[in-house]
Amino acid sequence: MTVPPQATEPHTETTEPNGHWPLPDLAARALGGAVLTANDESFAEKEHLIRPYPVLHQSATFGHRGQLYDGWETRRRREPGHDWAIVRLGAPGRVGGIVVDTAYFTGNYPPEVSVDACRLDGHPSLTDLEAADWHTLVPRSTAKGDSRNAYDVDFPGRVTHVRLNLHPDGGVARLRVHGTPVPDPDGFADLPLDLAALVNGGSILGASNAFYSNPVGAITPGLATSQADGWETARRREPGHEWLDIGLAGRGVVRVAELDTTHLKHNAPGWASIEAFDGDETFTLLPRTALVPDTPHRFVLDNDRPAVSVRLNIFPDGGMARVRLYGRLTAAALAGMRERFEAR
Ligand SMILES: NC(=O)NC(NC(N)=O)C(=O)[O-]
């Protein structure tokens, strides 16, 4: 199916099943996720499963293989067994919840699904994956048609790949694998890193307003593709200002802040400041500073104090395409990261 890109899914559609601040989707294409293989994709291609966009549908749009779907759809199975697809997580980590979205699949959704996981660090081949030790994340469970089927997951340890199983066959529009990244500290060597980056273990802890987009975009790799890709608030009509709280990859010293207002042409904040938190202590990383629209700004900070989280204040409102906080983890934080990576 040829489906044009839409704005990325709004914040409200990515809420994590147990109701906390949404855990990011570890399978997201923007993080490097990929649908590696499927046993069957006769009706519709497996790659649709991790598209970041809301599901599109037009009824009675028949192609050479039947109705076109923005999802993965297998043929009607005439022999025993089930269908499956394997997805590589862009950010390997601990999985907290899975969403199997069957939007628009009504007469052809799988009545039951299950999800397995494995951990194969490095760059495994499909043959390696076939031979891997797979564990159950979601046992065989009922799925509804045309619905966001959300399943809680309680599975310890780092997952690198998931396998979605359809019992016995059918179509699924999207697969979201919500969780917490567990990075490999070896990848950092002894280099400074972006302590805010999701793939390095940074997280969004809260936001005063996330009306237009999921703020996790602001700590996602690469340049923002449009205004929908980043953090954008509604227009503020009361006194005060908006803010975004970011958990750092670990306790570390931030030396350079990058505040990128790219694509925010008529809605960039006028000014920004950054406060840092370390236990009971609060200190200023960046005093209130003027910003310009549609521009990546780099600020070298006069700082040698470690912090565990920061608050980015924007005045009075607007958003931020990307926030990068370059610095170094403390030795203890690096050791903690290694422990989490090695936990099985
Ligand atoms: N892509 C399809 O045409 N799938 C199905 N049929 C319709 N009409 O959606 C089916 O499962 O037979």
Image: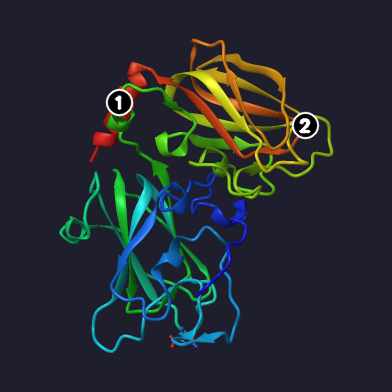
Discs 2/1, front: 1
User: Residue 189 location, x and y as percent?
Assistant: 30, 25
Q: Is residue 137 left or right of residue 45?
A: left
Asked where in the image residue 191 lies, by quadrant, the reply is top left
Residue visible at 55% across and 52% down?
15
SS for callout 2: loop
Asked where in the image residue 172 lies, by quadrant, the reply is bottom left
Q: Is residue 238 left or right of residue 227?
A: right
Q: Is residue 212 visible?
A: yes
* 260 or 220, nearer to the observer: 260
Q: Which residue is mark 2?
A: 316
Which residue type carries mark 1? Ala
* 218 or 298, nearer to the observer: 298
How far apart marks 2 and 1 lie (CA) works out to 39 Å
User: Residue 19 location, x and y as percent?
Assistant: 53, 49
Position of 342 relative to 94 (above/below): above
Q: Nearer the N terminus, badge 2 or badge 1?
A: 1
Which residue type carries mark 2? Pro
User: Residue 76 location, x and y as percent?
Assistant: 35, 86
Residue visible at 73% across and 35% down?
293
SS for callout 1: loop
Are there few (<14), some (14-19), or many (20+) residues within 10 Å of tag 1? few
Residue visible at 53% across and 45% down?
20
Farthest residue, direction left: 131
Q: Which residue is mark 1?
A: 189
Are there few (<14), some (14-19), or many (20+) residues within 10 Å of tag 2? many
Q: Is residue 279 left or right of residue 95?
A: right
Q: Which mark is on residue 209? A: none
